């Protein structure tokens, strides 16, 4: 593992991170408690009846903690009747107030709910994207100003017995943090630690951390770095962690991106409570989150490969693709061979049976093309625990594509990590073929959600570690569906961008337009723009910050009014909502990123 930093006990063996218990109402988070599932209502907080109905609906669906936005003190006052009516209905699910920008809203909310979420990036800061140098004295003065704003909330939470989440968002780091640490996982961690030190200085410890980002790589690195920093601070910094990929989007893409970020951290024993953020009705988040938790519970009981004395060959805190040499393999459908490894894009393999099932309709598969048939390629399959097998591969003078053998009762993440670590001693840098599972599925009736989450967690985790040069999805029987899943995982992990990339936030009470309907209209207009990244944000909480990661942005600026962004710069203001999608298309054209959509060929995948 890199330097002195450590974020888990064993990269090749599962062990849940130990944390203290923090009580949110009657629900314990961390300690020996199971991983808790959270969500957030989407109704206007001032609509008490609708808010109560959504809270009760989420609780009935299995949500254990429900969050409600409180953007001003006036909004926060409605938390009192909401809480009273939820309790009168016999529901004791803890309520959380989501606070941005307004300390007075937090102080009001803490009177009525069991937990308050604050965002260090905007609780006492304004984001103006200013570039300036801070001396140590000026920085200390800023921290004192923050302390004066934050301590009253700490004291009120102590008095009322409230918990708190110190929740950093990659999209809303303060100018002060950005100028000292940059738009980085380190900046996210330092932003949270500043607030934690203030809380601890007042003797308050009932808080939970989160490090959310829309990019799974950034999110994973930030949580790992946070855990490593907490370990360095001392054993009493063992606070629980809330996991989430913010602005994950909708449909398969949102589920895949969430599984990559949340699932990979859970696989390393990190995480005590989760929220899957989908641009859909909040009720649809619960089955996904519960399935991720149940899959992790199964994983915790599995055997892992013995890896005594083996060190990681990658840096868990900074993404870098593992170096490998190029090998050429027969193409599934073309005359020219396919290059795998090196700096080549990660390739998609399929089995001979699946290729035979789709080869008559390849033109209709669009971007979801099978590139290599696994049985027709020279692939060396090994048990990474077997010293003799590994010695033979490591002694080869020419590179070959290497994978873990099917049928081994091994955890895929741990086994491919072990393979990568042991291949580091090879004479040549062999490329690696990743598999989602090591036992190909023959069950055509298997729940696709589980297949999707397992494949995304296992493959996405490894890709975000920089491991892998090609992938083979074996957990899905349907040929076209397995290919689609393969490409969507590569896209979500940032390994191969083949379509428009959307950053879309989930709805909440701050949203200034219908996110689901608007996101769909934007997809219909722009879904053919390969490699273009578009952010769809319901309000300005994360909008300006997430614009820094997007090419173009569509952000609610006021009711029925939209602001359009290029990068992090707002360029069009107060556009009527009915005109905004067309104006977004015009903006993309102005910047030379537009191409006309090709004719679509209908095909069942």
Image (cartoon, rainbow, N blue to C red):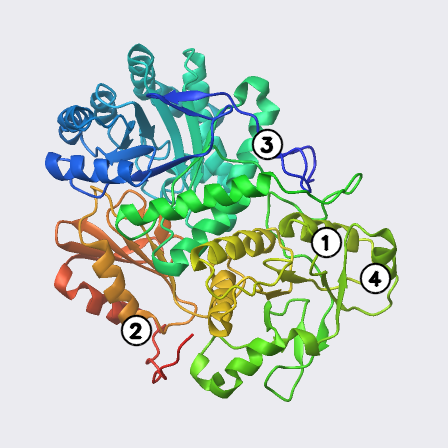
Asked if the residue at tag 1 contacts the one at tag 2, i.e. Cβ–Cβ closer than 8 Å, the answer is no
Of mark 3 and mark 2, the one earlier in the sequence is 3
Pointer 3: residues within 10 angstroms few (<14), some, or many (20+)?
Answer: some
Q: Which residue is mark 2?
A: 589
Residue at (30, 53) in percent of width and height: 279
> Which of pointers 1 and 3 indicates the residue nearer the eye?
1
Residue at (68, 67) in percent of width and height: 342
Of mark 4 and mark 3, the one earlier in the sequence is 3
In whole angstroms, how far apart are the C-alphas of marks 2 and 4? 51 Å
Residue 267, which numbered label?
none
Picture coordinates of residue 378 (x, y %)? Answer: 75, 74
In whole angstroms, how far apart are the C-alphas of marks 1 and 4? 12 Å
Left or right of 450, for residue 569: left
> Which of pointers 2 and 1 indicates the residue nearer the eye?
1
The residue nearer to you, when weighing 135 against 70, is 70
Q: Secondary structure at mark 4?
A: helix
Left or right of 442, for residue 64: left
Asked if the residue at tag 2 contacts the one at tag 3, i.e. Cβ–Cβ closer than 8 Å, the answer is no
Above or below, comparing residue 602 to residue 207 in the picture: below
Quarter of the figure with the C terminus: bottom left
Pointer 1: residues within 10 angstroms few (<14), some, or many (20+)?
Answer: many
Q: Which residue is mark 1?
A: 420
Q: Which residue is mark 3?
A: 228
Quarter of the figure with the N terminus: top right
Of mark 2 and mark 1, the one earlier in the sequence is 1
> Which of pointers 2 and 4 indicates the residue nearer the eye?
4
């Amino acid at each position: 593992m890199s330097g002195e930093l450590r974020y888990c006990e064993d990269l090749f063996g599962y062990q849940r991170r130990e944390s203290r218990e923090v009580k949110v109402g009657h629900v314990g988070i961390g300690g020996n408690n199971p991983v808790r599932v959270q969500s957030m209502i989407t109704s206007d907080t001032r609509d008490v009846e609708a808010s109560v109905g959504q809270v009760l609906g989420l609780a009935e669906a299995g949500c254990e903690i429900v969050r409600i936005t409180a953007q001003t003190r006036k909004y926060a006052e409605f938390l009192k009747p909401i809480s009273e009516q939820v309790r009168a209905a016999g529901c004791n699910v803890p309520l959380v107030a989501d606070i941005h920008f307004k300390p007075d809203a937090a102080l009001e909310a803490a009177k009525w709910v069991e937990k308050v979420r604050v965002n260090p990036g905007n609780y006492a800061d304004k984001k103006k994207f200013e570039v300036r140098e801070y001396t140590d004295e000026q920085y200390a003065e800023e921290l004192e100003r923050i302390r004066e704003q934050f301590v009253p909330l700490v004291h009120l939470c102590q008095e009322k017995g409230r918990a708190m989440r110190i929740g950093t968002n990659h999209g809303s780091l303060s100018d002060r943090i950005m100028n000292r640490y940059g738009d980085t996982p380190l900046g996210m961690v330092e932003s949270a630690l500043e607030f934690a030190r203030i809380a601890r200085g007042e003797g308050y410890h009932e808080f939970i951390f989160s490090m959310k980002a829309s990019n799974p790589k950034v999110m994973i690195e930030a949580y790992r770095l946070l855990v490593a920093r907490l370990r360095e601070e001392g054993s009493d910094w063992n606070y629980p962690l809330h996991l989430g990929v913010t602005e994950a989007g909708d449909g398969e893409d949102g589920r895949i991106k969430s599984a990559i970020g949340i699932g990979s951290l859970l696989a390393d024993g990190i995480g005590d409570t989760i929220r899957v953020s989908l641009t859909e009705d909040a009720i649809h988040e619960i089955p996904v989150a519960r399935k991720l938790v149940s899959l992790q519970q199964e994983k915790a009981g599995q055997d892992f490969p013995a890896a005594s004395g083996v060190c990681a060959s990658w840096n868990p805190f900074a993404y870098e693709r593992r170096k490998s040499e190029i090998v050429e393999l027969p193409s599934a459908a073309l005359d020219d061979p396919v290059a795998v490894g090196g700096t080549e894009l990660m390739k998609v393999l399929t089995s001979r049976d699946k290729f035979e099932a789709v080869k008559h309709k390849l033109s209709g598969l669009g971007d979801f093309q099978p590139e290599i048939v696994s049985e027709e390629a020279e692939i060396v399959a090994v048990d990474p625990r077997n010293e003799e097998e590994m010695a033979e591969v490591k002694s080869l003078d020419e590179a070959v594509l290497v994978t873990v053998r099917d049928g081994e009762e091994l955890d895929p993440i741990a086994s491919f990590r072990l393979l990568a670590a042991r291949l580091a001693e090879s004479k040549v840098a062999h490329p690696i073929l990743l598999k989602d599972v090591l036992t190909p599925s023959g069950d055509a009736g298997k729940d696709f959600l589980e297949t999707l989450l397992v494949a995304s967690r296992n493959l996405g985790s490894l890709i975000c570690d920089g491991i892998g040069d090609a992938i083979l999805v074996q957990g899905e029987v349907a040929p076209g569906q397995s290919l689609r899943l393969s490409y969507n995982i590569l896209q979500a992990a940032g390994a191969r961008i083949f379509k428009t990339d959307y950053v879309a936030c989930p709805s909440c009470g701050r949203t200034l337009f219908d996110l689901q309907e608007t996101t769909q209209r934007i997809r219909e207009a722009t879904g053919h723009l390969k490699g273009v990244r578009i952010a769809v944000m319901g309000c300005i909480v994360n909008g300006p910050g997430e614009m820094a990661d997007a090419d173009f942005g569509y952000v609610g600026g006021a009711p029925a009014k939209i602001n359009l962004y290029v990068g992090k710069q707002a360029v069009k203001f107060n556009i009527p909502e009915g005109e905004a999608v067309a104006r977004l298309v015009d903006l993309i054209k102005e910047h030379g990123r537009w191409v006309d959509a090709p004719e679509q060929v209908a095909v069942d995948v």
